């Protein structure tokens, strides 16, 4: 959590860190600035000292909402740098990094670079920094970065925010069930409204997006995939497709706070009207796997045990698994879950392949077993977001029934 | 435009380019893949050859929508790389870059790196690439990158998409005017609904977001800033503030296609009920500046002439300008405009400081003069998005009247 950052800087031998990036939503910046919405600029932090922001003069009022000290480019010598570099604003921008580090009291040493933005720019900037300011070593991290590691556990304020997102997301999913349920079945198996107009996936997605926005949430690319499409875990579904009775629909919703912020991630699989026997059977296996996963949980246990248990269930029923065949494209072909926070995919990983992850108090993660049979025309996934409470109990944040068959009005 | 990419690679002496980045919306990837929505993966292009995608097996169906050839990680030797690097997925991921370049027929040379995503990761990946595969030089660009340069001019298909965004955005702004106008004035100057309930900025923003979503657009951080807040160009406005008659409201809306895509950018300034004399006078100056800017336009002309003309107008009326005082925080304190496309801020720059930008056929850009007097409790900005047509004419894409006073129902 946030209080770990100085310790995590020490283990990485970082004297300072700089958060760069041009994105409006920049998770590391959001993390250190309490979600201030600025364009461009830097966040600079010397180890064991408070971070500060460096922003364009136009961003001062927004930056001040961070509660951090805010310097403008001018405060840090922008005009002088532009003179020094004869109007070359790119060299001047690089000079601003050095001035900001000096202002932080860091005259040399290792500087970790973080943030979200343009990849080409950061490569050029760090190349120039290395040339102009050899007293610093600018370093990145592949894999588990400092901010990824900090985010493995959430503090109480973060869990409250995720809980609030979870409640609103659950409301939206239940409202979507009711919306579809208010329709009826046409003779050709189409789901239609009172006037006989077919209900499309595009219309359902629009309903969902509006319901999210009404609750100050934003969609980040939901999946609403019917039949064969649902057999490909990341197929988002086709807007023009008409909802049909007896087809499994994988509905994966993972919105976040409006303008960027914390996520909640959940999936339900629905069959409108009735479920074919093959779908019902696979669904029962997924539910059994889900319940087995929850039963296996324990603080300090390796997370892989949870995915091993799910693989055991599926393999006992003869489903292909990634554990048995790393190249499988059917059956259970992804890992069981992942952490959820400012990014939709965080640590811990819940996978039989994750050798080092253990459950800890403050983890917020998904449990999402699934089975995929595109050739048979269906996929199934059930997903809740859960967290590990102070008392070591696993608490679900997702408040939506796990029913497969969604009945129509008539 | 897109057809310039091979030429732009040649001028940069790039043998290949790689688009990386974990973002769902990644402008360079969107540009080359026709907006395919994949998570992670790479786009690889050898100069003078078609690009291809490299994605996780789960992303194959979405990636195929790009029309490009798609390889999975497995196709490019993921399993073998994991064996070679003894299960170190980060080293294996770096190896995948080299395998992808080899598959593209690029055995050595200069490789430009582009895309949008995690900055720390790309620094670590390129560091490892340089160590493991010294036959390649991996390079970034600061300032005008290859994709920025390509985007200076838009082709007909892009302008059609932006026009479509502009029409829908304009509809939303007119609907917002009508929505506010349907309210009435309370004795204390508050804007209230039929039941006497005050209308807040938060409620107006919610109305706007819903109106955008209904039209398959997404807000990217609109400004709706009243009174003194409007005097800070990038203040977004306070949700809890109640709309008041006689206060200038700066309403800057710059949404994009849902899920990431092309933008349209526009601003109107409204005074509900009536406008104070000082606001009306400044508003008239802004409109005069806007019209002067349009009159100055000509293909091949330096873009700075347009901003010079605006500075001339404002300085003639005694307003502080950035041209006269680079540190001013009142008056006209930003540049006149910027290109608009997949990114909200693109080239050309329309600024007296931009020495090298010229107007070209296919430019899509904003014209947005403004005046800011927070101490006097107001700011004003008027902004249209325009493009340069094949016949060299300047055509506005924004279809909203430029009225200052927004009358209430009663």
Image (cartoon, coloured by chain):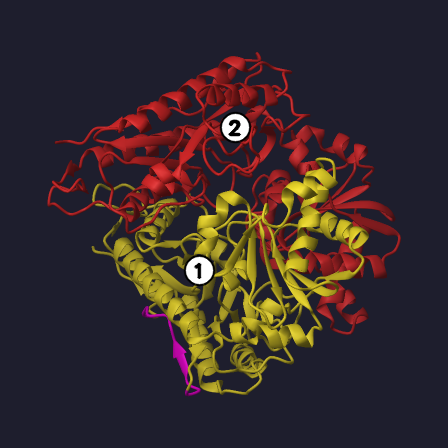
Chain colours: A red, B yellow
The answer to whether residue A226 is visible is no
Q: Considering only vertical position in the picture, is B111 above or below B200? A: below
The residue singled out by tag 1 in the image is: B254
Q: Considering only vertical position in the picture, is B304 above or below A148? A: below
Specify whether residue B393 is painted magenta. Answer: yes
Residue B408 image point, x, y percent: 25, 57
**In-front residue for pair B395/B276:** B395
**In-front residue for pair A393/B95:** B95
Depth check, mark 1 against mark 2: the one in front is 2
Residue A344 image point, x, y percent: 53, 38
Residue B114 image point, x, y percent: 63, 60
- Give the residue displayed 48% in from the left and 57% down from the top: B230
* Quadrant position of residue B395: bottom left
Residue B122 image point, x, y percent: 69, 51
Q: Main secondary structure of the magenta part?
A: loop
Specify whether residue B314 is painted magenta. Answer: no
Q: What is the magenta range?
A: B391-401
Within-10-Å neighbours for mark 1: few <14, some 14–19, many 20+ = many
The answer to whether residue A272 is visible is yes
- Give the residue displayed 56% in from the left and 21% down from the top: A308
Q: Is residue B12 left or right of residue B340?
A: right
Secondary structure under tag 2 reads loop
The residue singled out by tag 2 in the image is: A336
Within-10-Å neighbours for mark 2: few <14, some 14–19, many 20+ = many
Secondary structure under tag 1 reads loop
* Quadrant position of residue A284: top left
Q: How far apart are the alpha carbons under marks 1 and 2? A: 39 Å
Q: Considering only vertical position in the picture, is A278 above or below B130? A: above
Instruction: Chain letter for mark 2, please.
Output: A
Q: Quadrant of the C terminus of chain B?
A: bottom left
- Give the residue displayed 45% in from the left and 65% down from the top: B380
Q: Is residue A214 left or right of residue B263?
A: left
């Amino acid at each position: 959590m946030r209080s770990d950052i100085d310790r995590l800087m020490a283990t990485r031998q970082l004297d300072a860190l700089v958060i760069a990036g041009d994105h409006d939503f920049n998770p590391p910046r959001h993390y250190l600035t309490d979600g201030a919405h600025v364009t461009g600029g830097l966040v600079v932090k010397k180890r064991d000292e408070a971070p500060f922001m460096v922003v364009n003069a136009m961003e001062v009022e927004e930056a001040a909402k961070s509660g951090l000290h805010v310097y403008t480019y001018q405060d840090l010598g922008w005009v002088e740098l532009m003179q020094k570099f004869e109007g070359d604003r790119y060299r001047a921008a690089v000079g601003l990094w050095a001035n900001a580090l000096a202002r932080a009291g860091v005259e040399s040493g290792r500087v970790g670079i973080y943030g979200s933005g343009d990849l080409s720019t950061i490569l050029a900037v760090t190349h120039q920094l290395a040339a102009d300011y050899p007293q610093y070593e600018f370093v990145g991290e592949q894999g588990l970065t400092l901010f990824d590691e900090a985010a493995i556990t959430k503090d109480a304020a973060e869990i409250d925010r995720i809980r609030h997102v979870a409640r609103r997301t659950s409301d939206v999913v239940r409202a979507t069930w009711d919306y579809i349920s208010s329709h009826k079945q046409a003779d050709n198996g189409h789901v239609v409204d009172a006037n006989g107009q077919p209900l499309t996936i595009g219309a359902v997605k629009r309903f969902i997006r509006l319901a999210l926005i009404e609750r100050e949430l934003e969609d980040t690319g939901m999946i609403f995939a019917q039949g064969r499409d649902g057999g490909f875990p990341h197929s988002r579904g086709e807007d023009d497709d008409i909802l049909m009775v007896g087809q499994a629909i994988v509905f994966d919703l993972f919105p976040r706070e409006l303008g960027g912020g914390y996520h909640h991630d959940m999936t339900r699989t629905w069959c409108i009207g009735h479920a074919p026997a093959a779908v019902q059977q696979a669904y029962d296996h997924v539910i059994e796997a889900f319940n087995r996963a929850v039963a296996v949980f324990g603080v300090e246990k390796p997370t892989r045990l949870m995915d091993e248990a799910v693989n055991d269930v599926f393999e006992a029923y003869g489903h292909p698994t990634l554990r048995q065949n790393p190249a499988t494209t059917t059956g259970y072909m992804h890992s069981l879950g992942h952490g959820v926070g400012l990014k939709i995919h965080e640590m811990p990983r819940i996978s039989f392949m994750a050798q080092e992850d253990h459950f800890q108090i403050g983890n917020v993660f998904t449990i999402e077993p699934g089975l995929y049979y595109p050739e048979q025309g269906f996929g199934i996934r059930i997903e809740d977001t859960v967290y590990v409470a102070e008392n070591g109990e696993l608490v679900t944040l997702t408040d939506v029934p796990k029913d497969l068959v969604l009945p129509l009005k008539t």
